[in-house]
Every structure is written in C-alpha cells, then in structure tokens.
Amino acid sequence: MDALSRIKMWIGGLTEIGLMLLALAIVAALLVGGSLPFFGGVVGNMINLVKELGSNGLVGLIALGLILWLFSKRALA
C-alpha cells in the first residue's frame, strides 16, 4: 500500500505542476500576445475548448462538470 500512496502523490504533484504551467502560459500569452515559442497557442486552445463545450449543450455542461471535478482540490486518499 505504501507504493500506491507514493504513486498517487507523484501523480498529484505532476498534475499540480501541469496546472501551474497552464496558468503561466495563459498569463504570458495575454501579456505578450500571439503564440509563444514554448507555450504555443494556449489561449487559442482554451477558446476552442470552451466553444466545443458550449456547442454541445447538456453534454458539454456534463463534461465541464467532470473536468472541474477532476481538477478540484481534494485530499488524496
């Protein structure tokens, strides 16, 4: 069981780092404008994701709820 908790801690840490990089990419793209060499078109991708979820009605709303649930702060068991 100790190995399973270590794996969960690693996955949680990597997810947290990924979210921080996503936030950094959004802020940097908004400040600089255009697409940045390392971060790419993050803002454009986010806009396309929101458009896709919005055009799918209830299915998009359910998918958005699942995404928010996955990335919400919850204790790792």
Image (cartoon, rainbow, N blue to C red):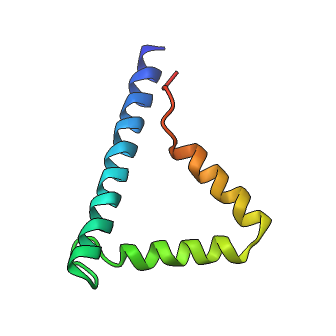
Q: Position of residue 4 (x, y in %)?
A: 47, 22
Q: Residue at x 71, y 61 (%)?
A: 61
Q: Residue furthest front?
A: 31
Q: Nearer the viewer, residue 43 or 7?
A: 43
Q: Residue furthest bottom?
A: 34
Residue 8 occupies which quadrant of the picture? Answer: top left
Q: Residue at x 39, y 75 (%)?
A: 43
Q: Residue at x 31, y 51 (%)?
A: 20
Q: Residue furthest top?
A: 1
Q: Is residue 47 left or right of residue 56?
A: left
Q: Nearer the viewer, residue 66 or 27?
A: 27
Q: Position of residue 35 (x, y in %)?
A: 28, 82
Q: Nearer the viewer, residue 8 or 63?
A: 63
Q: Position of residue 53 (x, y in %)?
A: 65, 70
Above or below: residue 66 compared with residue 61: above
Q: How many marks?
A: 0
Q: Is residue 17 left or right of residue 77?
A: left
Above or below: residue 73 compared with residue 26: above
Q: Residue at x 55, y 72 (%)?
A: 49
Residue 60 occupies which quadrant of the picture? Answer: bottom right
Above or below: residue 50 compared with residue 7: below
Q: Position of residue 68 (x, y in %)?
A: 57, 50
